[in-house]
Structures are given as C-alpha cells and as structure tokens.
Image (cartoon, grey):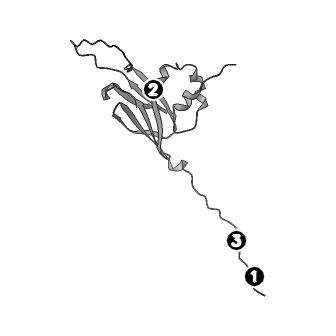
Amino acid sequence: MRHFDLSPLYRSTVGFDRLFSLLDQAGTQDAAASAYPPYNIERTSENEYRVTLAVAGFAREDLSIETRESTLTIKGAKEHPEPAGVKREVLHQGIAARAFERRFQLADHMVVTGASLANGLLHVDLLRQIPEAQKPRRIEIGGGVPTQTVEARAA
C-alpha cells in the first residue's frame, strides 16, 4: 500500500480547513521544489492572516505577487546580472538565489491587503471579508401567548 504525505497540502491553505480536493495535485508536486523558499502562515486576529516568505537576496523588483480567483501566487526571479568587470569565486554557496514560484489556495472572501519586504522576509497580509448576508445572525423566537407566573402564597 502506498502512503502519501499530504502535509504540503495542509500547509498551503490559508483561511479555511484542509482541502482534500487538492489530492489530484499532490502527485505532481516535486518535494524539493516545493520546499523553497521556506514560509510561515500566521493568524494575527480572527479574520487577519500573514504569509511570510524567507527571500534573502531578492530585491523588491525581483518579486511579484498576484491573486487570481482563489490562488495567491508569489514569484521571485533575479533580474540583476552581476556588474561587468567584477570577478568573484564562490567558495561555498549556501544562500539560494534561484527563481521560485509559490502558490497558496485562499478561502472564499480572502483579499490581500498589503505586502512588505524587510530584512529578507516578504510579508503578505490577508483579510477575510465575510459579506453581511453570510455572517451568522441571531433569530428571535416569537409566537405564543406570554405565560403568567403564579406565585405561591404563604399559609
């Protein structure tokens, strides 16, 4: 019997419970490619979330953020070639600077409210905007005749 590691599916969903409908995509993802860049997903309040990616070495111009339907796509590609005449020999390359594309499935009514880049971390802020018609509302129970309370008299 084959066992599938579904944890990548669970980690890449923001704002709603795990989606088993993504099982079809599980077999097509390369584990090594899906591990870069590392990221965190945080819930900052009841309806606010933050996705943080470690993008050391990337400038603002190298990154792009796009939402289409319910998918948040973050891409990074180095656009800046090395300056002419500068010759370097890398003795150890531990900092990855390869291009990447990271996708996150968003729940309904999730919108990107902003993004910032500081200290090698890209922060993408999300907000769940639930329409009034879909918010829970309290229904008063009516009908019937009001009941009378009969008090017992002391004998």
- Answer few, some or many: residues within 10 Å of disc 1's Cα (few below 14, many 20 plus, some between 14 and 19): few
- Answer few, some or many: residues within 10 Å of disc 2's Cα (few below 14, many 20 plus, some between 14 and 19): some
Between 96 and 143, the one nearer to me in the picture: 96
| SS of the residue under disc 1 | loop
Q: Rounded to the nearest whole Å, what is the CA distance between mark 1 and mark 2?
A: 73 Å
The location of residue 53, given as percent across then percent down, is 42, 31
Position of 155 with respect to 23 (left or right) is: right
Instruction: Tell me: residue 133, above or below residue 144.
Output: above
Between 24 and 141, the one nearer to me in the picture: 24
Kindly identify which residue carries mark 2: 102
The location of residue 138, given as percent across then percent down, is 59, 57
Q: Quadrant of residue 86?
A: top left
Are dots 1 and 3 in contact, CB under 8 Å? no
Kindly identify which residue carries mark 1: 152
Q: Nearer the viewer, mark 2 or mark 3?
A: 2
Amino acid carrying mark 3 in the image? Val
Return the disc, 1 or 3, that comes first in the chain's sequence. 3
Between 21 and 124, the one nearer to me in the picture: 124
Q: Rounded to the nearest whole Å, what is the CA distance between mark 1 and mark 3?
A: 22 Å
| SS of the residue under disc 2 | strand
Residue that extends furthest to the right in the rendered view of this protein? 155
The location of residue 13, given as percent across then percent down, is 52, 33
Instruction: Tell me: residue 151, above or below residue 72.
Output: below
Position of 3 with respect to 119 (left or right) is: right
Kindly identify which residue carries mark 3: 145
